[in-house]
Amino acid sequence: MKTFPKHQQAPAPLTLAEKEAAYEAFLKSKVPPTNECGFQITPEDVHPLLKPHQRDVVRWAVRLGRAAIFEAFGLRKTLQQLEILRLILKCNEASRKQDELFPFNRGLIVAPLGVRQEFIRDAKMIGYWLDSVMYAQNAEAKVNQPTLFDLLAEEEEQPA
């Protein structure tokens, strides 16, 4: 037990509200600052097929610029990811200045082969065209994803 000199009184115990406020301040001090590198969009910019909670997640992710969406199964993360990509490409298209270097406006989604059909289905549902790229190298169906440079080289080789 801590004793105090006669001329010094022990501090009064903290009330519950003071303890909660101190703990809240402690927790806030542990949250790292965010460096938003995205851009603002309005709710009207988001496809009307998305539900309100999905629209909020899409707007948040686009604003942050780098975000991970950890949602439960069935909340349509695929649809949200496609919409985020569409909005980014739309913004990129509006701000492009070097059409001779980048004549196309494409995005890349890397996903397990098992969800490929889900992406294609959801893209069609909201009116987007999505191309799926996969190469099977041998009979054991070992999948090697091509790099962007492989895709560009193939485009150059194809006759017009």
Image (tube, rainbow, N blue to C red):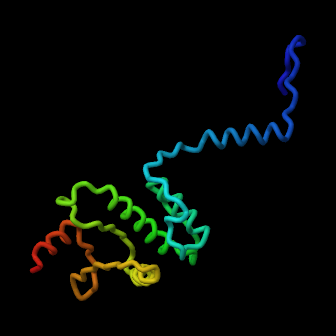
Image side of residue 9 versus residue 46, left or right: right
The single residue placed furthest to the top in the displayed view is: 7
> Which x, y percent locates residue 131?
31, 79
Name the residue nearer the viewer: 47 or 25: 47
The single residue placed furthest to the right in the displayed view is: 6
Name the residue nearer the viewer: 96 or 111: 96
Say which residue appears at 27% left-offset and 86% top-offset: 140
Image side of residue 36 versus residue 25, left or right: left
> Which x, y percent locates residue 95?
32, 55
Name the residue nearer the viewer: 148 or 99: 99
Say which residue appears at 46% left-offset and 83% top-offset: 125
Say which residue appears at 35% left-offset and 78% top-offset: 130
Say which residue appears at 46% left-offset and 79% top-offset: 126
Q: How many marks?
A: 0
Q: Quadrant of the C terminus?
A: bottom left
Q: Quadrant of the N terminus?
A: top right
In the image, residue 55 above or below residue 13: below
Image side of residue 102 versus residue 2, left or right: left
